[in-house]
Image (cartoon, grey):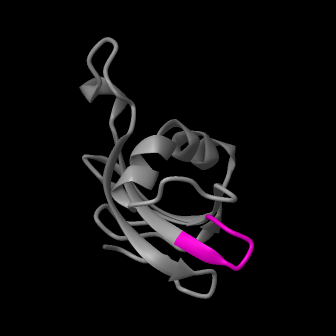
Amino acid sequence: MLAGGAGPVQKANDDVKAVCNELKAEILQKAEKDAVEIFEAVSYRSQLVAGTNLFVKIKVNSNGECIHARIFQPLPCNIEDGGKTAELHSVQKDKQMADEVAYF
């Protein structure tokens, strides 16, 4: 993967799932959802910048509805003591399992 380019779609791993769970309340708030049936990171793409952008597909119900979340992870050298290791940038709501997770 080149710096600045988004990588291929990958199955969500434990690290991506943990970041999404850490930001769950913010993701749901930004997506204007009070509660969801399921909250499961399914797949993601990453983009190397001055840190890493994660574009994550999160399944929120059994009908296949999803939220796409853009999460920024700064480089470790740019995290101050006690600072956030991940920040929610934006979300796309009303997505489906068939929708490709892409740069936004």
Name above or below for residue 32 compared with residue 9.
above
User: Is 87 in front, or is 63?
Assistant: 63
Q: Is residue 45 left or right of residue 59?
A: left
Question: What is the x, y in percent for residue 15?
Answer: 61, 42
Q: Which residues are magenta?
A: 60-66
User: Is 12 in front, or is 22?
Assistant: 22
Q: Which residue is the extreme one toward the front?
A: 34
User: Is 14 in front, or is 31?
Assistant: 31
Q: Is residue 52 left or right of residue 99?
A: left
> Where does the N terminus fall, quadrant-wise?
bottom left
Q: Which residue is the extreme one toward the bottom?
A: 98
Q: Residue at x 47, y 78 (%)?
A: 94
- Does the magenta run of residues contain 62? yes
Q: Residue at x 45, y 53 (%)?
A: 28
Counting labels gives 0
Name above or below for residue 37 compared with residue 7.
above
> Where does the C terminus fall, quadrant-wise?
bottom left
Question: What is the x, y in percent for residue 21?
Answer: 57, 42
Question: What is the x, y in percent for residue 63?
Answer: 71, 79
Q: Residue at x 56, y 72 (%)?
A: 66
| Residue 47 appears in the rendering | no
Q: Residue at x 50, y 68 (%)?
A: 67
Asked which quadrant contains residue 30, the reply is bottom left
Asked which quadrant contains residue 53, the reply is bottom left
- Does the magenta run of residues contain 74? no
Q: Is residue 82 left or right of residue 18?
A: left
| Residue 50 appears in the rendering | yes
Task: Give the prevailing secondary structure in the magenta stretch.
Answer: loop
